[in-house]
Image: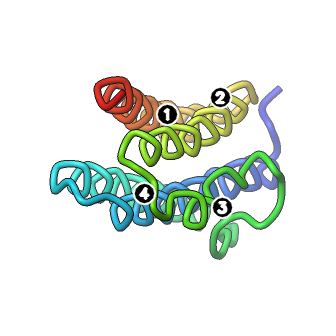
Amino acid sequence: MTMNTNDVIKTMNDLIETSRDGEQGFRTCAQGVTSPNLKTLFEAAARRCAEGAAELEAKVRGLGGQPAQGGSVGGSMHRAWTNIKSTITGMNEHAVLAECERGEDTGKHAYEAALKQDLPVDVRTIIERQFQGVKANHDRVRDLRNAAA
């Protein structure tokens, strides 16, 4: 049985918050590194998170819902990104990448949890496509972290 509209909206709002957290986290990582290549990578990842949030917001509105405002303040699952600024200050690039990867793990888990639900096909299609982007961000960061080790 497909979820009711309120549950679908709640699931999408959770992902909007997760995407905003990722956007902020990647922007913070971009500020925390000196390498122009890493700055560019983190800024591009932040943009993808912002685009994902905007797409989900439009879908929530289309279902008659109110998109989540701001990033997540709730569950500890989403907190990985929020402590990143204090964590990365003065760190080397390998350590910044490791923190960034940990933040993206959070995003991956949020999308995996959403995809376990019985979502309407149009919503599932958006979330699956965005999940591929989250995985690509994560894997890119992981590969760079491994290379920096």
Residue at 69% from the left image edge and 67% from the top image edge: 65
Dot 2 falls on a residue whose secondary structure is: helix
Q: How many other residues sit within 10 Å of disc 3, few (<14), some (14-19) or many (≥20)?
A: few
Which comes sooner in the sequence, label 3 or label 1?
3
Q: Which colour assignment does the render follow?
A: rainbow
Q: Foreground mark, 2 or 4? A: 4
Q: Are marks 3 and 1 in contact (CB under 8 Å)?
A: no
Picture residue at 55% right of the left edge, 66% below the top: 85
Foreground: disc 3 or disc 1: 3
Query: Residue 42 at what x, y percent from top left?
Result: 32, 53
User: Where does label 2 land, which residue?
Assistant: 112
What amino acid does circle 4 point to? Phe
Q: Are marks 2 and 3 in contact (CB under 8 Å)?
A: no
Report the residue marked by disc 1.
131
Q: Which mark is residue 26?
A: 4
Pointer 1 local density, CA inside 10 Å: few below 14, some 14–19, many at least 20: many
Residue 96 percent across, percent down from the top left: 44, 48
